[in-house]
Image (cartoon, grey):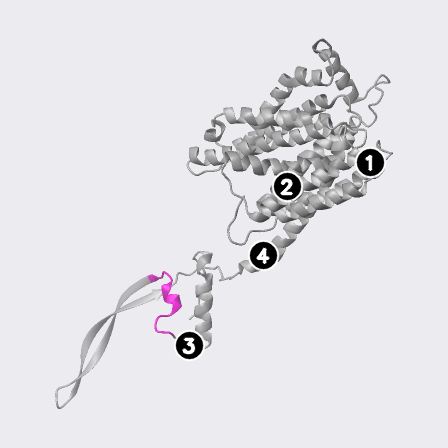
Amino acid sequence: MAYSCMYLSPSVHSILSIDHALSVNGTHPQAPISSLLPKSRIVYSQLSYKPSFNGRSKSYLPKFTTIYHDSVPNCKFRIRAQKEDEQAPSNNKIVIVSSAITVLLAIANRVLYKLALVPMKQYPFFLAQVSTFGYVAIYFSVLFLRYRAGIVTNEMLALPKSRFIAIGMLEALGTAAGMSSGAMLPGPAIPILNQTFLVSQLILSTLFLGRRYSLNQIAGCLLVAGGVIVAVSSGSNPGQMLSGIGFVWPAIMIASTVFQAGASIIKEFVFKDAATRLKGKSVDIFVVNSFGSLFQALFILLFLPFLSSFKGIPFSELPSYIKSGAGCFVNIGANTPGCDGAPLLPLLYITINIVFNISMLNVVKISSAVVSSLAVMLSVPISIYILSLPLPYLPEGTNLSSSFLFGSCILVLGLILYNLPQRDKKTA
């Protein structure tokens, strides 16, 4: 038999469908599948007469029979069975569209990073400070809304701040070092050198988290390192892209990725430790990002005298440096030579960088971290090509040597090998 109404959870839809199919086909098992469903039992008595023979005549004796009747309550909801596979095509489309958007944003983020440093070439620390304070304002605004909505709890906000201080210090060093070296390096070299983040993260996570990596991940990481070495070494030859640029600037860019990788390792430790402190609950990501960005902004202020002295700016001239950086950023008046493109390019970079990070987190949420990594990886060769072309405020373009292209191909091959899915068990 089949029912025309539903009052149960969706988990029993298949039971009803199988029972209906058996009934239609004329198959009646001893214990119908529908009998597994809960029913309301009605009990009543029925009076009947049982014939009795005394040898000569037939008489009827009264008999009371107790009848149990199982029924399903009346309801107006019809049974609708829906397979989970029917939603798969739409989910796949969402993942594809979101990944494509993330790739475009990653390319724009890399290109605008270099373009934003064109007008702020002499004031990279000021740009780092402005961008960090922008992240603090946005992250804490979102954190406040999530706290009001009950997503962020008081227990999450009460987590030890010492780890956030360490995160902020490392990210401050990474941001300042990255922007100071990025202002001096050719555009295509920046995406290449940034990929050393993967090598730094693998080494640090092995040392401090005890994580084990598969052979293809180790091989991919070695290929990434080899590709960077081949690409950077091309600058030693006259007429090449990195010729005339001291080794110190690529080294500072690589050091910035080490600082960023260290911050990511501490963040991972914070998430694992919070699961224990919060009794199995996961700490909201905006708690980590908000407090990390707050201490990052404070440490950039604290490090500013030391960072400016590295650029040859004495401590006594630091107020004048900050004032000149602010004037270059807003680019108002005729007394700001060399600041063409500000404030449009810096503000575009800050905006795209925030949207890119949100888009990347969304891809991780709806698919996986591997898909997100592949989307970011795809942006590397495309952004290298775009940054080699003549661009607004970078009209000269860059000549890509054969050794640089060869090193880039080795790097991309290493990234693909590193991100190959694991069959047996899931490693980092």
| Disc 4 residue type (three-letter) | Gln
Residue 320: tell me if it is visible.
yes
Q: Magenta residues, as a range?
A: 29-40
Secondary structure at badge 3 equals loop
Precedes in sequence: disc 3 or disc 4:
3
Precedes in sequence: disc 1 or disc 2:
1
Precedes in sequence: disc 3 or disc 2:
3
Question: Nearer the viewer's eye, disc 1 or disc 3?
Answer: 1
Question: Nearer the viewer's eye, disc 2 or disc 4?
Answer: 2
Question: Nearer the viewer's eye, disc 4 or disc 1?
Answer: 1
According to the picture, the residue beneath numbered tag 2 turns out to be 360
Contact between labelled residues 4 and 3, with CB atoms less than 8 Å apart: no
Precedes in sequence: disc 2 or disc 4:
4
Precedes in sequence: disc 1 or disc 3:
3
In the figure, 411 relative to 124: above or below? below
| Disc 2 residue type (three-letter) | Met
Alpha carbon of mark 1 to alpha carbon of mark 2: how far?
A: 34 Å
Q: Give x and y (percent) for residue 122.
A: 77, 21
Say which residue appears at 69% left-offset and 47% top-offset: 100
Alpha carbon of mark 3 to alpha carbon of mark 4: how far?
A: 32 Å
According to the picture, the residue beneath numbered tag 4 turns out to be 87
Q: Nearer the viewer, residue 334 or 237?
A: 237
* In the image, residue 33 lies in the stretch drawn in magenta: yes
Q: Which dot marks residue 240?
A: 1
Q: Which quadrant, please, contains the N terminus?
A: bottom left
Q: Give x and y (percent) for residue 395.
A: 87, 34
